[in-house]
């Protein structure tokens, strides 16, 4: 099985109910699951939503971390529609770069355990590929302590259709990556939200893989109708369908297998699924994540 990063913040109760004892049990247990090499963790203006010092002390030994500032980016774009590394507005682009300087400073506290840092091509609904290229040139000049930068593709603007993120199109992101060592990461659910067609997601994954830029693929569901993990076409991270048949997830076994086949050379995978509504303990959450991992393993990940 390829190395897998588990999205700790999608599965953890910590982002709605802070329980240090539960979290201290959960993080190492997720890392102990077969094939798991580390965790995707969010940056929300700091390394943890409640207690950054606690998190620095409780990173599981040996865990490889992928840091995503996307929750912070979404908060900032709500406050300032011109915010983002792909902003044509100089002040909005500068604000996004300033925040990434803070991300860089914080990951320096994690003793070299950060392997990936995700970038997102905000602003929403109006990104500028030229501005993105300028931002990437600047970001590449910084010392990231050995962490690799990756653009995580999110749903792009599509005419006549509401968007969740509304960032740049995949082709624009790939063009901006030309000539750089920055990678590309895809999220199945976010591509489904963009394309509204599970089969089209397979095609997008295949196209991304053909570019030679794809370094990772996250398995996270999406739903075309309201369900236990949120409304239709929202980024609620529903589980794989066979791991929770009530989820209404479009990510069934056939599309998992097709996604894996479309990106055979991608060196790493992610798993980003919400805990079951009934999950209360760390053991409950670990069991939910393990069921989803078992699907990936069974289908040849």
Image (cartoon, rainbow, N blue to C red):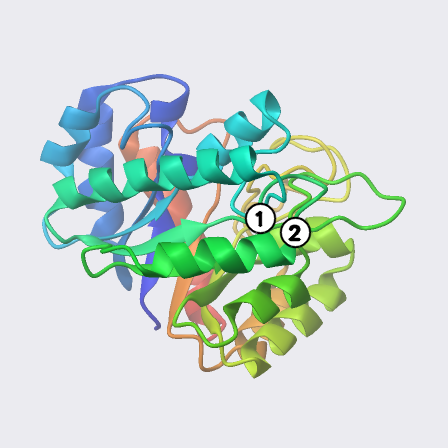
Give above or below for 3 relative to 235.
below
**Point 75% across, 48% down: residue:** 157
Left or right, 2 with reference to 23: right
> Would you call the spot at circle 1 few (<14 residues within 10 Å), some (14-19), or many (20 or more)?
many
Q: Quadrant of the C terminus?
A: bottom left
Instruction: Give percent across and percent down for residue 183.
Output: 43, 67
Element under disc 1: loop
Is residue 178 at all visible to an observer of this figure?
yes
Residue for badge 1: 86
Which image quadrant for residue 235?
A: top right
- Please state the horizontal and vertical placement of residue 114, each as a whole percent of the image: 23, 52
Quarter of the figure that contains the N terminus: bottom left
Q: Are marks 2 and 1 in contact (CB under 8 Å)?
A: yes
Q: Which residue is mark 2?
A: 128
Q: Residue furthest right?
A: 160
Q: Residues within 10 Å of mark 2 (few under 14, many from 20)?
A: many
The residue at the point 62 percent across, 46 percent down is 245
> Residue 164: where, in percent of width, then height?
68, 38
């Amino acid at each position: 099985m390829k190395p897998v990063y588990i999205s700790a913040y999608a599965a953890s109760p910590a982002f709605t109910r802070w329980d240090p004892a539960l979290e201290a049990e959960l993080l190492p247990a997720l890392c102990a699951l077969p094939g798991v090499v580390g965790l995707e963790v969010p940056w929300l203006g700091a390394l943890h939503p409640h207690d950054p010092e606690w998190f620095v002390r409780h990173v599981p030994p040996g865990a490889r971390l992928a840091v995503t500032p996307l929750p912070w980016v979404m908060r900032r774009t709500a406050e300032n529609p011109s915010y983002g590394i792909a902003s044509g507005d100089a002040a909005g682009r500068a604000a996004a770069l300033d925040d990434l300087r803070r991300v860089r400073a914080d990951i320096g506290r994690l003793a070299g355990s950060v392997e990936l840092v995700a970038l997102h091509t905000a602003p929403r609904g109006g990104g500028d590929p030229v501005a993105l290229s300028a931002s990437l040139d600047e970001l590449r000049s910084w010392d990231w302590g050995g962490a690799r930068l990756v653009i995580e593709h999110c749903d792009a603007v599509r005419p006549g259709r509401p968007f969740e993120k509304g960032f740049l199109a995949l082709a624009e992101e790939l063009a901006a990556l030309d000539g750089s060592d920055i990678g590309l990461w895809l999220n199945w659910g976010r591509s489904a939200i963009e394309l509204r067609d599970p089969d089209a997601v397979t095609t997008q994954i295949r196209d991304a893989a053909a570019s030679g830029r794809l370094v990772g693929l996250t398995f996270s569901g999406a739903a075309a109708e309201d369900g236990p993990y949120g409304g239709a076409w929202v980024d609620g991270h529903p589980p794989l369908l066979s791991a929770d048949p009530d989820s209404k997830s479009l990510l069934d076994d056939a599309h998992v297998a097709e996604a894996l086949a479309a990106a055979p050379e991608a060196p790493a995978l992610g798993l980003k699924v919400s805990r079951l509504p009934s999950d209360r303990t760390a053991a409950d959450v670990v069991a939910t994540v393990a069921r989803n991992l078992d699907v990936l393993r069974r289908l040849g990940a």
